[in-house]
Image: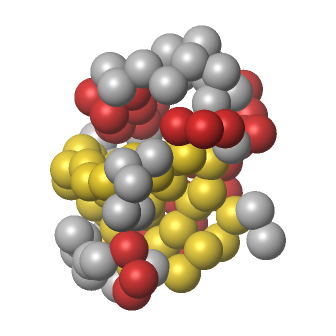
């Protein structure tokens, strides 16, 4: 399986609530009716400001634009992630962040 990764910098968020690491993937899994599933999270910078959430999917190319639309229309823990998040894709679920390709913003 492949992955979509949502990377969030807490310094750019209105409310850097750590609950987002659970609420965001749960909401996306529900919204996608199971086409995207929670595949974990990690801090991807040395200082611990950037949290990335991995979502497993069989079709990252088809789903990442839909995920962006969700980020534009819903707030998560009072954060507008369309203003602060990056969306990346990877050929393998659980891929290291450096092996992911940023697709949004372009």
Residue 104 visible here: yes
Looking at the picture, how far across and down is residue 32, in whole percent?
42, 39
Task: Examine the rendering and report whether any part of residue 81 can be seen.
Answer: no
Residue 71 location, quadrant:
top right
Give me the residue at 27% from left, 77% from top: 95
90 left or right of 6 in image: left
Q: For this view, does 35 lie left or right of residue 103?
A: left
**Above or below — where is 51 with respect to 88?**
above
Q: Give coordinates of residue 105: x percent, y percent.
A: 75, 62
Foreground residue, 102 or 16?
16
Q: Position of residue 80 (x, y in %)?
A: 69, 27
Residue sitting at 26 percent across and 50 percent down?
Answer: 41
Identify the image quadrant of the C terminus.
Answer: bottom right
Q: Pick the residue in front: 42 or 24.
A: 42
Q: Please say if 20 is above or below 104.
A: above
Residue 102 occupies which quadrant of the picture? bottom right
Q: What is the residue that sits farthest to the top in this orientation? A: 78
- Answer left or right for 34 relative to 97: left
Render colour scheme: secondary structure
The quadrant in which the N terminus is found is: bottom left
Q: Name the image quarter holding residue 78.
A: top right
Specify the farthest residue to the front.
Answer: 47
What residue do we see at 65% from left, 72% from top?
A: 103
Q: Residue at x 50, y 15 (%)?
A: 77
Q: How many callouts does the rendering have?
A: 0
Q: Nearer the viewer, residue 58 or 93?
A: 93
Give the answer, above or below, for where 96 lies relative to 42: below
Give the percent coordinates (x, y) of residue 17: 42, 20
């Amino acid at each position: 399986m492949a992955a979509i990764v949502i990377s969030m910098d807490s310094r750019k968020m209105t409310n850097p609530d750590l609950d987002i690491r659970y609420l965001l993937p749960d909401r996306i899994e529900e919204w996608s009716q199971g086409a995207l599933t929670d595949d974990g999270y990690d801090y991807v910078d040395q200082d611990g400001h950037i949290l990335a959430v991995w979502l497993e999917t069989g079709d990252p190319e088809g789903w990442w634009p839909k995920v962006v639309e969700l980020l534009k229309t819903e707030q998560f823990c009072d954060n507008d992630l369309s203003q602060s998040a990056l969306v990346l894709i990877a050929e393998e679920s659980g891929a290291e962040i450096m092996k992911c390709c940023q697709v949004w913003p372009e």
